[in-house]
Amino acid sequence: MKTYNIAVVGPLGLVGRKVIDILVERRFPVGDIKFLGTSKNKNKKVEFNGESILTEVAKEGAFMDVDIAFFCVDSSISKYLAPIAVKEGAIVIDNSSAWRMDNNVPLIIPEVNPEDLHSHRGIISNPNCSTIQMLVPLKPLHDIYKIKRIVVSTYQSVSGTGKQGMEELNNQMIDYCFNVPMTSSVYPHQILFNVLPHIDHFLENGYTKEEMKMVNETKKILDENIKVTATTVRIPVFIGHSESVNIETEKPIKVEDVINILEKAKGVKVIDDIKSNSYPMPIHIQGKDEVFVGRIRKDFSIENGINMWIVADNLRKGAALNSVQIAETLIERNIL
Ligand SMILES: NC(=O)c1ccc[n+]([C@@H]2O[C@H](COP(=O)([O-])OP(=O)(O)OC[C@H]3O[C@@H](n4cnc5c(N)ncnc54)[C@H](OP(=O)(O)O)[C@@H]3O)[C@@H](O)[C@H]2O)c1
């Protein structure tokens, strides 16, 4: 079997670690693998398939023998380093927001728009975690009923901020238990026992950058004519993003048909039985690959409307798993 030389950039972060796990879990055909991190964390041991590999520094010259580089770092680093990696011969699959809205860079969810991969010029972008989990179930509905408008509110876990977000919630829990005053450095307010209607920076239009990512990425991936309005909210959950999603469709849409379609949709699992209080929740979906949908019901306030509740593991389908699936699709479609 043909194998591919892999680099993981940012191997000690939450997404980088997950990419490494998922490459092993899915038996990705890895030839050589290298882990490229910061100079402060050079020569750290990282386990891969029972082998201990030392991290190297991510810099010019490191990508010469690499076929696929998974970038799991901030957008400023990706902006600088991804073009260097491409020049040295690698295909970059980038998790940051650096390239998502670049016209020359495909923004890919393999269940939704795999055909866009064919236009890649070296860099491929992974969408925002909240966009990915929303569009996986909405795509098969859009194909049949044509979605006109989406209203979404998110309930996003602290791991979406990276390892510092998880540390901040953890530290505030410890401070609370020991009756010590809590400090906040990652978020502008205490996150423990709180809800922050604020993810990423505020923009001049009054929305946050995260909210506008959901709007713009949905248009790029699914349909530029869809109207989207988003409110993105951080909650004190470690892993798993939840979303309340309302769609308005052009064609009449029935709840039972939505359930039928979503039960057959690739990458989707329906958990929807209100009699037994069954609906998706972050505590149940951690470590799972699917996007979970429940609370599917008619929106009685408009003619053709549906409400639903969507939950997914933001580190897996929202980031690492989607990246590895992009690489698998490149191989399947022979476009490496
Ligand atoms: N977390 C999510 O749910 C999620 C979802 C979708 C997309 N993303 C995106 O994925 C990227 C990574 O997120 P994350 O959650 O994994 O963040 P993270 O936990 O903070 O990890 C970031 C990693 O980047 C490394 N790094 C920093 N500067 C570097 C450099 N110059 N060269 C190489 N590595 C460098 C850090 O290394 P050290 O450990 O040595 O400091 C750290 O391990 C971000 O762009 C994020 O927006 C995250």
Image: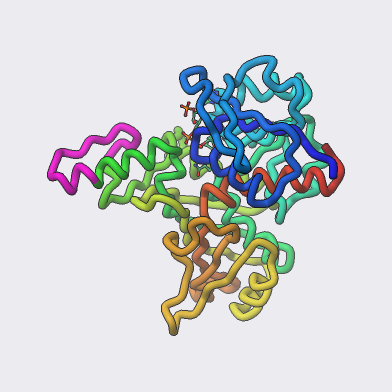
Q: Can you give x and y, in whole percent of width and height, for residue 160 in the image? A: 46, 44
Front residue of this view, candidates 322 and 7: 7
Q: Nearer the viewer, residue 298 or 303?
A: 298
Instruction: Give the residue at the far bottom of this rendering.
Output: 275
Instruction: List the single residue furthest toward the right.
Output: 334
Against 39, residue 19 (above or below) is below
Q: Nearer the viewer, residue 44 or 181?
A: 44
Q: Which image quarter holds the C terminus? A: top right
Residue 334 lies, in percent from the top left, at: 86, 43
Q: Which residues are magenta?
A: 174-189
Could you tell me which residue is drawn at 46 percent across and 19 percent down?
40
Instruction: Please give left or right for residue 180 compared with residue 92 in the image.
Output: left
- Where residue 60 sits, quadrant-wise, is top right
Colour scheme employed for the rendering of this structure: rainbow
Residue 221 shows up from this direction: no
Query: How many numbered marks have been drawn onto this rendered protein structure?
Result: 0
Name above or below for residue 20 compared with residue 111. above
Q: Is residue 242 visible?
A: yes
Q: Which residue is at a point 50% across and 33% down the rendered structure image?
A: 12
Does the magenta run of residues contain 160?
no
Q: Position of residue 246 (x, y in %)?
A: 52, 63
Query: Looking at the magenta stretch, what is its main secondary structure?
Result: loop
Quarter of the rendering containing residue 164: top left
**Quadrant occupied by the N terminus:** top right
- Rendered image quadrant of residue 141: bottom right
Instruction: Please name whichever residue, 200 or 284, is drawn nearer the observer in this view of the structure.
Output: 284
Identify whether 162 is placed above or below 228.
above
| Residue 9 location (% of width, % of height) | 60, 29
